[in-house]
Image (tube, rainbow, N blue to C red):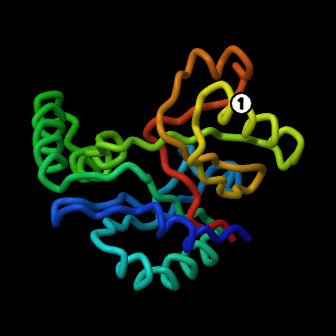
Amino acid sequence: MINNFDTIKLLLDFRSDDDFYHCQIIKRKKEHPELRSNSYIVKTYYIKKYEELDYYRDEMIALAELHNARVQINLNRRSFEKMAFHTQKKIADQLMNKDYRSVRKAYNSCCGKYSNETDKKWIIDIDTKDSDFMEEIEELLHNRLDIHDFIELPTKNGYHIITKPFNLQEFKKYYDNIDIHKNNPTILYIP
């Protein structure tokens, strides 16, 4: 079991009533080979204040346990105003293309794509629990990329290192096989 609720709560920053964080409970094909697609969204939450994360925590954990699913959150803030405009455009495009079935998923789709973040957070996706390897990555961040503030969150097979943007080309000189996610969710909870 992975539970990152308390650590992630410290990373959230609500600056206005327009801010929210996009959070989903997702079943993945890796754990559920019967799925017809790569993933299935069990439930979506739009977290508007710190208290909501606490309020929904037990429900999220229960649903994740029930469905053998992950609770994920994107740490780059979203804007209700901007999501409304992106959704309006997406729906117009879908209607013009006669893609009527997808209209119901337009808002959630836009929430997954568009952030409203001034202090972007990237994820370095480490797929090992090897402590020596983690020390190498930390040393690279400190000494080569001049990044000293980062958070390591455990995942099922390794860690997500949450950091500010950095020189990607410099990082890839040393580790070109590690995925860097610029606008992806991280793990809140895995059963």
Vertical side of 133 occupied by 111: above or below:
below
Q: Is residue 35 above or below residue 24?
A: above
Which residue is found at the position 73% from the left and 23% from the top?
Answer: 175
Question: Residue 172 placed where, x, y %?
Answer: 65, 18
Image position, residue 7 (x, y; %): 57, 67
Relative to residue 19, is residue 124 drawn left or right? right
Task: Pick the residue in front: 128 or 14.
Answer: 14
Q: How many marks?
A: 1
What is the quadrant of residue 22 in the picture?
Answer: bottom left
Q: Is residue 149 left or right of residue 10?
A: right
Q: Residue 56 at what x, y percent from top left?
A: 42, 81
| Apparent side of residue 132 relative to residue 88 in the rendered image (left or right) | right
Image quarter in which the N terminus is found = bottom right
Q: Look at 74% across and 56% down and name the residue there.
A: 156
> Which residue in the protein does label 1 denote?
140
Question: Which residue is found at the position 65% from the left and 57% from the top?
Answer: 153
Q: Along the line of sight, which residue is nearer the eye, 35 or 12?
A: 12
Q: Is residue 120 left or right of residue 83?
A: right
Q: Foreground residue, 191 or 57?
A: 57
Task: Tell me where residue 142 appears, x and y as whole percent.
Answer: 66, 36
As helix, strand or loop, the secondary structure at mark 1 comes to: helix
Identify the amino acid type marked 1: Leu
In the displayed structure, 33 sits above or below 183; it is: below
Q: Residue at x 57, y 78 (%)?
A: 61
